Image (cartoon, rainbow, N blue to C red):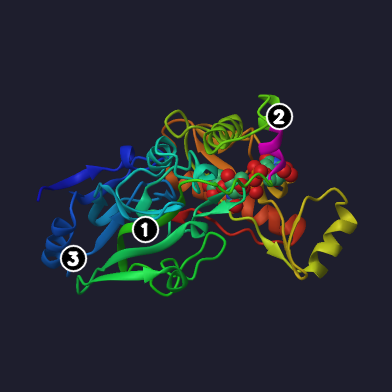
């Protein structure tokens, strides 16, 4: 195993922030991961996946284990369904493209989400009416301290909106090594509830959509409002959409009749944080080499060599302003390091 001292993490985080790791190790197999954990269990460790959901505000005084374990295999299949095991280091979108090539349905709405397979369950990635939990069967994870490999079923993962047990009770205790997903081989269940998907398909004159045409539509929609991390550093939605009570919503509606909302239950209303941030005046605001994206206010961007600290301070200013104007606390979706 090669350990690199004082390694730059710039190319390993989609925000493109320059930060150094005290030491860095590229992990390409479970055996190597177990071995490294045994050797370094008493040293501070930092687990890095696709680097698409974090903001580095400082150097990492730890050994960074970069999980790059690859592989995709069939676990079992029937005429209608197939269970696929994908290793943690596979890129999420490449996996979606692989599924489309084989005509396996279920993940097409999750096209173009940055990040890796292994980190997808941690925040239960989701977009356009589908969440990872909808296709998730189980995952394997290795315990950092005793190196035992454990299987977590879907219910054990305690998935919720951008949440799982790996962000809560078991935070920093396990490293996910692979994920099993159940996909359809025929009679695909197309999820087209989002108006924008219908509009996009209509504009292209598609009347009988396939999983491929849904994926193409999602890619077009995402490209039209979300910046490509290869061009402009970002971590997707910086904040979660807040969920407020019906009473709080009624009070807000008095002042802001046009406020968009999605009813989750009778007493839980989700408000798009992008709207709150736009209303607070931050959409498209640029401060030197960082700012708020001009097409989606939920996305903070690094135009050049911005520091993670500066972006974090902007996020805190946005959070404070939204709280002052709407009395709503928006929580970060991105992990602040
Ligand atoms: N809106 C504004 N101004 C903005 C942005 C949004 O007013 O600048 C309002 C509009 O009313 C719009 C509504 O917010 O109709 C919803 O916007 P959008 O469809 O872009 O979705 P979102 O709620 O902002 C969520 C996810 C995205 C995901 C989309 C589509 C979260 C935190 N974000 O965004 O996920 O792609 O839905 O399903 O739930 C991510 O997690 O990184 C991510 C990009």
Q: In front here: 75 or 228? A: 75
Secondary-structure class at tag 3: loop
Q: CA distance from mark 3 to mark 2?
A: 56 Å
Residue drawn at x 32%, y 69% as measured from the top left? 151
Give the class, few, some or many, for how many residues have Cα within 10 Å of label 2's Cα (few <14, many ≥20): few
Secondary-structure class at tag 1: strand
Q: Which residue is mark 1?
A: 180
First of labels 3, 2 by sequence position:
3
First of labels 2, 1 by sequence position:
1
Residue drawn at x 70%, y 54% as measured from the top left? 322
Please say if 86 is above or below 295.
below
Does residue 158 show up magenta in the picture? Answer: no
First of labels 3, 1 by sequence position:
3
Span of residues in magenta? 194-199
Q: Which residue is mark 3?
A: 43
Front label number (3 vs 2):
2
Q: Are marks 3 and 1 in contact (CB under 8 Å)?
A: no
Taking the view exactly as shown, the residue that stands out farthest to the front is 79
Residue 196 in percent (x, y) is at 69, 38
The disc at residue 202 is: 2
Residue drawn at x 14%, y 60% as measured from the top left? 36
Residue 25 in percent (x, y) is at 18, 50
Q: CA distance from mark 3 to mark 1?
A: 31 Å
Residue 247 appears in which quarter of the rendering?
A: bottom right
Q: Main secondary structure of the magenta part?
A: helix
Secondary-structure class at tag 2: helix
């Amino acid at each position: 195993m090669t350990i690199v001292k004082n390694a730059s993490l710039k190319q390993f985080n989609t925000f493109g922030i320059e930060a150094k790791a005290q030491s860095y190790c590229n992990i390409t197999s479970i055996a190597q991961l177990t071995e490294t954990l045994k050797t370094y269990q008493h040293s501070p460790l930092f687990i890095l996946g696709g680097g698409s959901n974090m903001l580095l505000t400082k150097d990492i005084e730890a050994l960074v284990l970069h999980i790059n374990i690859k592989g995709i295999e069939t676990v079992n299949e029937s005429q209608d369904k197939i269970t696929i095991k994908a290793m943690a280091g596979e890129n999420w979108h490449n996996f979606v493209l692989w599924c489309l090539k084989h005509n396996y349905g279920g993940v097409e709405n999750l096209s173009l989400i940055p990040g890796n397979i292994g980190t997808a369950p941690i925040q239960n990635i989701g977009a356009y009416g589908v969440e990872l939990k909808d296709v998730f069967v189980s995952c394997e994870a290795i315990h950092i301290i005793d190196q035992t490999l454990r299987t977590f079923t879907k219910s054990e993962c305690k998935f919720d909106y951008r949440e799982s047990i790996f962000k809560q009770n078991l935070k920093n205790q396990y490293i996910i090594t692979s994920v099993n997903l159940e996909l359809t081989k025929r009679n695909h269940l197309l999820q087209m509830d989002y108006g924008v998907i219908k509009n996009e398909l209509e504009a292209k004159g598609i009347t009988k959509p396939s999983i491929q045409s849904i994926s193409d539509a999602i890619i077009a929609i995402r490209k039209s409002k979300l910046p490509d991390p290869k061009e402009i550093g970002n971590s997707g939605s910086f904040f979660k959409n807040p969920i407020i009570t019906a009473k709080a919503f009624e009070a807000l509606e008095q002042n802001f009749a046009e406020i968009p909302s999605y009813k989750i239950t009778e007493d839980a209303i989700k408000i798009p944080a992008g709207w709150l941030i736009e209303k607070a005046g931050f959409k498209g605001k640029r401060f030197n080499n960082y700012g708020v994206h001009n097409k989606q206010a939920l996305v903070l961007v690094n135009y050049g060599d911005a520091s993670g600290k500066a972006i974090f301070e902007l996020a805190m200013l946005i959070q404070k302003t939204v709280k002052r104007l709407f009395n709503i606390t928006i929580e970060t979706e991105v992990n602040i390091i």
